[in-house]
Image: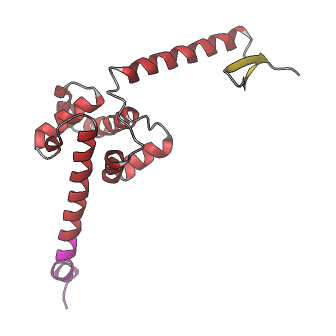
Amino acid sequence: MATLIDIFSHHYAPVIILGGLLLFFIGAVGQWMLYEKCNQRGIASLVPVWNVAAFMNIVGRPGWHMIYLLVPVYNIYFAIKIFMELCYCFKRTKAKDYFFMLALNGFFVLNLGFSATSKYYGPVYEGPIRDEWLVEQEKIREMKLRKQRMGGHTRVRRNATSYQEKPLVA
């Protein structure tokens, strides 16, 4: 009686190899297009160390941060953080975007690279995204201060021009 390994290795090996090559090709093309969209050279996605350094440039980190990917256990956290920063570079900040990025990473990168609607806004830690984030944080801070001054009983009504705070009426 043949073992499972014998059956698996003889009959399904070509399918597994072709499936792996297909996934590699999809990932490589997706990364190439992503790098081109982010004003990096596409060939950088195929060169082993250069691709990580270019990816760090895309999210606005210095190239030496790739050393963090060599630290056991911390590298898992750091890789997830970098890909979440990639989402932020494209202003994809909803929970479903983070989920798809984690679950279907290669296809998510392919989507970012080929999608006509996704636009690269620049690195997270410098440029316009950082400025927008700072302005947004300042607005949130002001809203919290106003809410504290009002005793915490406010609601926000959307007006045609802007948001207005009005006290709750019982």
Q: Residue furthest top?
A: 149
Position of 79 with respect to 117 (left or right) is left
Queried whether the magenta region covers residue 161, the answer comes back as no
What is the x, y in percent for residue 130?
39, 20
**Could you tell me which residue is drawn at 23 percent across and 31 percent down?**
56
Position of 150 with respect to 43 (left or right) is right
Residue 119 visible at all: yes
What is the x, y in percent for residue 84?
37, 37
**Could you tell me which residue is drawn at 17 percent across and 44 percent down?**
45
Query: Residue 10 or 146: which is nearer the viewer?
Result: 146
Queried whether the magenta region covers residue 13, the answer comes back as yes
**Could you tell me which residue is drawn at 70 percent across and 25 percent down?**
160
Determine which quarter of the picture holds residue 126.
top left
The residues colored magenta run 1-17
Query: Residue 167 or 13: which is nearer the viewer?
Result: 167
The quadrant in which the N terminus is found is bottom left
The quadrant in which the C terminus is found is top right
What is the x, y in percent for residue 89?
37, 32
In the depicted structure, whether residue 114 falls above or below residue 23: above
Determine which quarter of the picture holds residue 116.
top left
Position of 71 with respect to 90 (left or right) is left
